[in-house]
Image (cartoon, grey):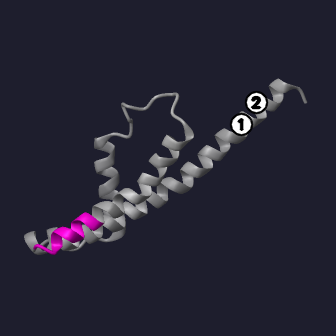
Amino acid sequence: MNKDSTNTLIGLLACSFVLFIMFIVTPLVAIIQGWVLTVLWSWFVVPTFRLPELSIPVAIGLSLIVGMFKGYNNPEKTENEDVYVKVTKVVMLFVGPFIVLFLGWIVTLFM
């Protein structure tokens, strides 16, 4: 194997790995966001507006709709991001909804 074919193989493996991770991370993040939305909805919207509670599938759908309008492109993204920045962004996809849930819980203490 020459150097060019080795680099091509490594590139294909890296691309495959990224796609594999995306197909695992994206549904997990959607489920987490849907669950957090159901909890926040039951804390704030149900008692205030007397609306029915949300199921997790409906909450996931609402989160996807809001995300579609919010957009997925990050204008600050640069092509020279180091691995630490990329890993931090992925971790925040998982941790961010729990931070929002925690802040919502604090607000419920004042209700």
Name the residue located 32 percent from the left edge and 66 percent from the top edge: 36
From the top left corner, tell me how far across and down residue 27 is, in percent.
48, 58
Identified by mark 1, the residue type is Leu
Secondary structure category for the residue under label 1: helix
The magenta segment: 102-110
Name the residue located 47 percent from the left edge and 48 percent from the top edge: 88
Do residues under tags 2 and 1 come within 8 Å of each other at their CB atoms?
yes
95, 24: nearer the viewer: 95
Magenta span main SS: helix
Question: What residue is disc 2 on?
Answer: 8
Secondary structure category for the residue under label 2: helix
Question: What residue is disc 1 on?
Answer: 12
Name the residue located 43 percent from the left edge and 32 percent from the top edge: 77
Name the residue located 61 percent from the left edge and 44 percent from the top edge: 18
Q: Is residue 32 magenta?
A: no
From the top left corner, tell me how far across and down residue 95 is, in percent.
40, 59
Image quadrant occupied by the N terminus = top right
Q: Quadrant of residue 34?
A: bottom left
Asked if residue 56 is positioned above or below residue 71 in the image, the reply reads below
Apparent side of residue 5 relative to residue 94 in the rendered image (left or right): right
Asked if residue 35 is positioned above or below residue 84 in the image, the reply reads below
Asked if residue 88 is positioned above or below residue 52 in the image, the reply reads above
Image quadrant occupied by the C terminus = bottom left
Q: Is residue 108 magenta?
A: yes
> From this viewpoint, which residue is outermost toward the right?
1
32, 53: nearer the viewer: 32
